[in-house]
Image (spheres, rainbow, N blue to C red):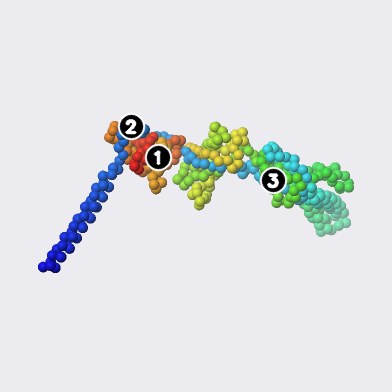
């Protein structure tokens, strides 16, 4: 009997514990279901909210991003010294506009003496061998020389002419004008012809990289940087979601604090690589540099305008917020008057068009979204 009573008490205890657990779970579920999924505001709070009715619109999408200014690589170059030796004189300073072939600096260089001596030697050799070839041709006509000897003399003369032309190109590459050698006289001495570093293109000297007395190495030492500043490159970063809207030749607007008026340009190249750090693709823009206001390494804002017009749903940028997972959403209003309720709805963003976003999924025509005051609703929802 005692054992039966103990067993009965144990069963009753288990049932009571189970009933209490179920009662607690039911209370929690009821509390969870009692938490409102929609927001209802007081009339004073609703006065802060401005709404916009969603409707299809025609628009031209734009990709808005940032970029960095660089010299136009097709119209700029670093000037290397063509000769070795110490710098004797600087003829230009940064900011100077130069034409192609203009002298930038002079160098005291033994390379010039060697090049001039080599050129004079090839000129003398070519003249002498050509004279011999002409004489041998006359001797061959009178049967005083074999054809083989005559052809050998002509071959030697042709080789000497080739050597002369090669030496001529060498002194031209060093910036020596061959006409400057014509008046040196029979002595072959050339005086007061220093080594010259010349501008390979027309433009503005934007950097001077050498100083007087500095020892230069031919083909190695950078001396100046020259750039045509009428246009610049802007290297913009475009993320994967926007790449489909960017094509070569499209019009771009570049804005900066240096000018209230945008700078016009075009898309020149869309990169083939994605930066693994930023997950963005580099897009090169050619921009007209009005009044030379854009400077290298300057940060600018970029808007790339797609030329194809399309229709879709647009909402104000202020209407789009981000949740804890960084996913975009909007607040959609339903009801009227004091019974108006506001519900979160996730959306998929498309292109940015001015101060509006294209919504590719999540909204339908006729939906009413919160255009201003969405941040207030997000804060109220968290309370």
Q: Is mark 1 on a helix, strand or loop?
A: loop
Q: Which of marks 3 and 1 is nearer the N terminus?
A: 3
Residue 244 versus residue 381: which sits nearer the camera? Answer: 381
Foreground label between 1 and 2: 2
Q: Mark 2 points at which residue?
A: 44
Query: Cβ–Cβ below 8 Å for labels 3 and 2?
Result: no
| Distance CA(mark 1)–CA(mark 2) | 23 Å
Badge 2 crowding class, 10 Å Cα cut-off, few under 14, some 14 to 19, many 20 or more, is: few
Q: Position of residue 95 (x, y in %)?
A: 68, 38
Query: From the viewer's perspective, is residue 36 above or below residue 6?
Result: above
Q: Earlier in the sequence, mark 3 or mark 2?
A: 2
* Res. 335 image quadrant: top left
Q: Distance between the residues labelled 3 and 2?
A: 67 Å
Whether residue 38 is situated above or below residue 165 in the rendered picture: above
Q: Residues within 10 Å of mark 1 (few under 14, many from 20)?
A: many
**41 sits left or right of 83 in the view:** left
Q: Position of residue 44 (x, y in %)?
A: 33, 32
Q: Residue tagged by mark 1? A: 320
At x 52% / y 39%, what residue is drawn? 302
Residue 104 or 213: which is nearer the viewer? 213
- Measure how far apart labels 3 and 1 are at the Cα level: 51 Å
Q: Where is residue 198 in the image (x, y as percent from the top left)?
A: 73, 43
Residue at 56 percent of width and 42 percent of height: 68
At 60% from the left and 34% from the top, the residue drawn is: 290
**Residue contact between numbered discs 3 and 1, judged by CB atoms under 8 Å:** no
Q: Mark 3 points at which residue?
A: 209
């Amino acid at each position: 009997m005692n054992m039966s009573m103990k067993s009965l008490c144990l069963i009753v205890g288990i049932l009571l514990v189970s009933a209490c657990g179920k009662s607690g779970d039911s209370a929690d579920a009821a509390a969870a279901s009692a938490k409102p999924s929609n927001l209802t505001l007081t009339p004073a709070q609703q006065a802060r909210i401005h709404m916009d009715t969603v409707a299809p619109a025609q628009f031209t999408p734009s990709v808005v991003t940032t970029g960095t200014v660089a010299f136009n690589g097709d119209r700029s170059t670093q000037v290397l010294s063509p000769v070795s030796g110490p710098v004797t004189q600087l003829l230009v300073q940064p900011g100077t506009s130069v034409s192609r072939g203009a002298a930038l600096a002079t160098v005291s260089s033994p390379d010039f003496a060697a090049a001039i001596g080599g050129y004079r030697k090839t000129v003398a050799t070519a003249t002498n061998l050509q004279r011999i070839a002409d004489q041998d041709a006359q001797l061959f006509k009178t049967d005083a020389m074999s054809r083989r000897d005559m052809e050998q003399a002509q071959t030697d003369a042709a080789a000497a002419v080739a050597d002369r032309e090669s030496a001529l190109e060498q002194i031209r590459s060093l910036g020596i004008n061959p006409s400057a050698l014509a008046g040196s006289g029979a002595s072959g001495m050339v005086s007061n012809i220093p080594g010259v570093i010349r501008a390979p293109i027309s433009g503005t000297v934007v950097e001077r990289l050498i100083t007087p007395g500095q020892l230069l190495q031919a083909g190695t030492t950078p001396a100046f940087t020259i750039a045509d500043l009428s246009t610049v490159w802007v290297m913009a970063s475009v993320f994967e979601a926007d790449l489909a809207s960017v094509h070569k030749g499209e019009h771009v607007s570049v804005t900066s604090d240096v000018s209230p008026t945008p700078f016009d340009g075009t898309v020149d190249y869309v990169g083939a690589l994605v930066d693994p750090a930023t997950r963005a693709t580099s897009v090169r823009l050619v921009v007209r540099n009005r009044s030379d206001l854009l400077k290298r390494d300057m940060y600018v804002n970029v808007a790339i305008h797609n030329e194809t017009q399309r229709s879709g749903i647009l909402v104000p940028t202020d209407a789009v917020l981000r949740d804890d997972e960084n996913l975009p959403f909007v607040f959609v209003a339903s009801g009227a008057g004091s019974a108006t309720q506001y519900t979160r709805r996730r959306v998929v963003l498309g292109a940015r068009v001015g101060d509006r976003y294209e919504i590719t999924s999540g909204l339908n025509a006729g939906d009413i979204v919160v255009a201003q005051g969405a941040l207030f609703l997000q804060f109220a929802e968290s309370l």
